[in-house]
Amino acid sequence: MSSGMLVVPWLALRALRGPRPGPEPWQSRVDLPLALGTGAAVALLCGLWLARFALGGATAAASPDFLEYCWSTAAAAAGTLDDVSRNRSLLAAAPSAVIGRQHGVLNGLLASAVLSTGLLASAVWLWARALHSRGAGMLAALAVGAVWPLCVLSRTLTYYPPIIALLALCAAGGAVALRWRTAAACAVAGTAAGLALLVDLRGLPWALCTVGLGALAALWGPGRPRRGRRRRGGGGLLRLGALALPLWLSFQAGPAAYLPGTRTLEDQMHTLLDLRKMGISVTRTVPRPRSDAGFVWGRSDLRGLPATLRFVAAEGQLVPPALREALHVVDHRRARVDPWLPVALGALAAALVGLRRRPAALLAAAGTALPFVLALDNAIVVKQSHPRFLANALPFLPVLLGVGAASLAGLEGRPRRSLAATLLGLLLVLGVLPSMLSPTADWRRDLQTTQAELDRARAAAAGTAAPRNVAARACAEGIRRVAGDGGWLDALP
C-alpha cells in the first residue's frame, strides 16, 4: 500500500453509517484510563517487538556519551550526589536511579526507557485528544510505534526518553489549556511547563510556548455554556493563578533538580563546536555569558531570561544556509526524514480541513508544534538526522498523523467508528496491512544507533576488558554493584 493509499481506509470508515456523533467533553473516568492504558500498551509493543526492526542486530541503543549516563545513574542510585553529572537534571536521572537502586544501573536505564515511552505515548494521546477527539488520540499513540526514532526510545539507555516524554507532555498541556480554557486546564499547562523546565534546561522553548498558550486560555476563558447550564472554569484571575502556581513551585524545586555547579543552558549549546567539526568556521555574534550568569531554572535570576533568549536565537543564526545542501546533510535527510514528507503533508491537509471551524484547536496545534519543528530543522542540518536528535524533534508527527486520520474518518463523537479505526491503525503499525508504516516497509533502514560503549562497559564490569578511563571505571563499578545487572537487556528479543 503506497503512502497515497493510506487515505482510502479512513475514507472507507467515514462511509460507514452509524448514530449521529455526540459531544466528547472531557471525562476523567474515561479519558485518563484510556491515555494511561494506551501508553502502557504502546510502550510494551515498542520495547518488546517493534524496536528490534529498527535496531538491526543490536539489542539496545546507547550513545557516544553513554558512560556519563551510566556513572551518573550509579551515583544517583547510591545517593552520592556529588558524583552526579552536572550536564543533566536529577529529574531526568530519577527513574533509572530509583529502579537501579535495587535492580542495577543497566536494568534501571532500560526500565526508565520503557516507562518513559509509555509516558510519551500517553502525552501524544492527550495532545491529539485535546486537538480533536479520543479516536485521534488512539491513532496518534499507535503512530509512535511507526516513527522509529520515537519507538527506539523504549530501548535507549540514556536520559533522552524521560526528557522527550516530558517535552511532549508539555506540548499536550498547552493544547489542553487552549481546548478547555478552565482553571484546571490552565493548571495542567503550568504543571507540564514546570516539569519540562525541571527535566532539562533546553526545555525552555517548549515551556515558553505552553505558558503562552496557557496565558491566552486564561484570558480567553471557557466558551459559552449550553442553555440551562452554569459557566464553569473560574474567573480570569483564578485561571492565571492556576497557571502560575505550578510554575512557581517548579522554580522553587529547581535547586533540587539542578545541583550546584550545573552547566547553564548557554554553556550546553554546542552549535559552534558542531559546525567546527564539519569544517565550518564561524564567529559567535553574541558572547557566551559567564558560567555563573547563564540560565539555570530555579538558580538564576529570571530577569536575565531575555539575554538567554537572545543568545539562543543568535546560536541558531550561526548555521550557514549552504549547509542545508551539503551532501552529508542531504543523504541522511533523504534516508530518515524525506520518506515521511508525503504522508505528513497529507495528514496536515486533512487536519486543517478537520479543524477548520475550530480556531482554538488550530492555534493550539501551531503553538505546540513550533518548538518541535525548530528542533527538527536543527536535528537535520546540524545533527545530520541522528536518531536521538530526531526523536527529540518528532513527537508532533504522531499527533499530526492521528489528527489527520481521525479527520478523514470522521471519528469525533463516534466511539464505534473510533474502535474500528484503532484496530485498523494497529494492523498498519504491525505491518499486517502493508504500507509505509509497516516495520518491514522497503524504505526502512536500520537507525545505525550504537551500543559500542554499552558493550565495552559490560565487558569492563565482567572483568574481560580494562576500563579506558575514570568514567569507564565508575560505570563498571556501578554495574557490578547489583548482581545480574543487565539481565533484562539479555532477555529482550
Image (cartoon, rainbow, N blue to C red):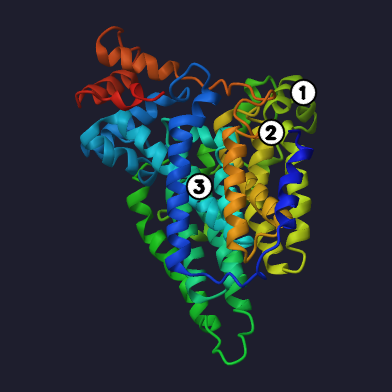
Amino acid under disc 1:
Ala
For disc 1, the marked residue is 326
First in sequence: mark 1 vs mark 2: 1
Asked if the residues shown at circle 1 and circle 2 are in contact, with their CB atoms under 8 angstroms apart, the answer is no
- Horizontal side of residue 63 vs 454, given as left or right: right
Residue 480 placement (x, y as % from top left): 22, 22
Residue 382 visible in the displayed image: yes
- Horizontal side of residue 248 vs 270, given as left or right: left
Dot 2: few (<14), some (14–19), or many (≥20) neighbours within 10 Å? many
Residue 421 placement (x, y as % from top left): 62, 51
First in sequence: mark 3 vs mark 2: 3
For disc 3, the marked residue is 121
Q: Could you tell me which secondary element the residue under label 3 belongs to?
A: helix
- Horizontal side of residue 408 vs 303, given as left or right: right
Q: Could you tell me which secondary element the residue under label 1 belongs to?
A: loop
Foreground residue among 487 and 216? 487
The circle drawn on residue 158 is none
Mark 3 to mark 1 CA distance (whole Å): 34 Å
Q: Is residue 150 above or below residue 11?
A: above
Dot 3: few (<14), some (14–19), or many (≥20) neighbours within 10 Å? many
Please give the name of the residue rendered at 46% of the width and 39% of the height, measured from the top-left corner.
Answer: 161
Q: Is residue 159 above or below residue 281?
A: below
Residue 249 placement (x, y as % from top left): 38, 64
- Number of numbered markers: 3
For disc 2, the marked residue is 435
Amino acid under disc 3:
Ala
Amino acid under disc 2:
Ser
Q: Residue furthest bottom?
A: 228
Dot 1: few (<14), some (14–19), or many (≥20) neighbours within 10 Å? few
